[in-house]
Image (cartoon, rainbow, N blue to C red):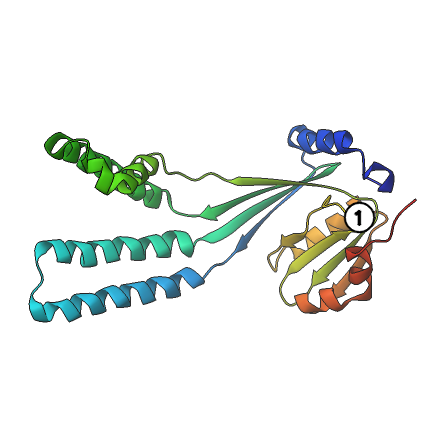
Amino acid sequence: MLTHKDIDNTNKIEAMRMALYNEEVLYEYETIEHQYLGYFAAAGFLSVMLWFLYDFSDDGIDAGEAIIFGGGGTIMTLFLIFFASADIRRVYKFTKNGIVTEQADVVPEYAYKCIRMIGRVGVVVCLIAVVFVGPIAFIGAGASALLSFKLVNFRLKPMLFESLYFDESVIFKTSKENYIDITPNSPLFLSLDSIFCNKDNVDDIFNTLKEFYPNGHFYEVEKEDDIYEHEKFKEFLHPMDQD
């Protein structure tokens, strides 16, 4: 548990952060945050591509245009559906000194396989272009070539975040959004800023936090905006100098 005496002790803070990954996990919670914006973007993008396809049809459409607008539009639409609209999965692991958070998009493995296959096809096309056109082909398609090579190894890579318990913190739970905010009474970002919960585990997570923040200040509000208007949040957001 960090206190105000540890604020300037960067060596201790970093050592504790690194040690979190080897500590015993005492509690573990999984939450899912649903995303919908990508579906609207995909519908809009596909509509634009179909409109271009229809508009050009008056003058006749060759095979190249059909591939660009039809194939390209379909690929981009699928990308927006699978990746821009992917739910966010978070796993919160509580240890004795802090919380380790694993965050990753919930994307089917076949979607990654599809992207990797597109990358392989792009690599082959670029190599064929070099054989028949020469190295100058990379000048016009350099970006495509680099992207193709990168897509070959495209796969899920979860992000990791760590946060340490700070002795004096204020913790809010919103009943409307199932959201928990943690703000330490410190000028440094030592503790988790927020926890996205599900309706079925928000109370369990809130009660678990009470165990690890014995000197914490706990409040329940209706919605997230109420947090920022709360007197205690404003006090801890701009902490006074500590002795």
Residue 99 percent across, percent down from the top left: 68, 41
Q: Is residue 139 above or below residue 187?
A: above
Which quadrant would the C terminus be assigned to in this image?
top right
How many labels sit on residues? 1
- Residue drawn where x is 34% and y is 36% of the image: 150
Q: Is residue 1 above or below residue 230?
A: above
Side of 233 relative to 32 (left or right): right
| Depth order, front residue of 120/11 | 11
| Depth order, front residue of 127/112 | 127
Quadrant in the rendering for residue 74: bottom left
- Residue drawn where x is 22% and y is 42% of the image: 140
Residue 200 percent across, percent down from the top left: 61, 57
- Residue drawn where x is 27% and y is 39% of the image: 142
Question: Do we see residue 221 in this rendering?
Answer: no
Which amino acid, by three-letter code, is at mark 1? Ser
| Depth order, front residue of 1/63 | 63
At mark 1, the secondary structure is loop
Side of 229 relative to 87 (left or right): right
Quadrant in the rendering for residue 112: top left
Q: Is residue 24 above or below residue 113?
A: above
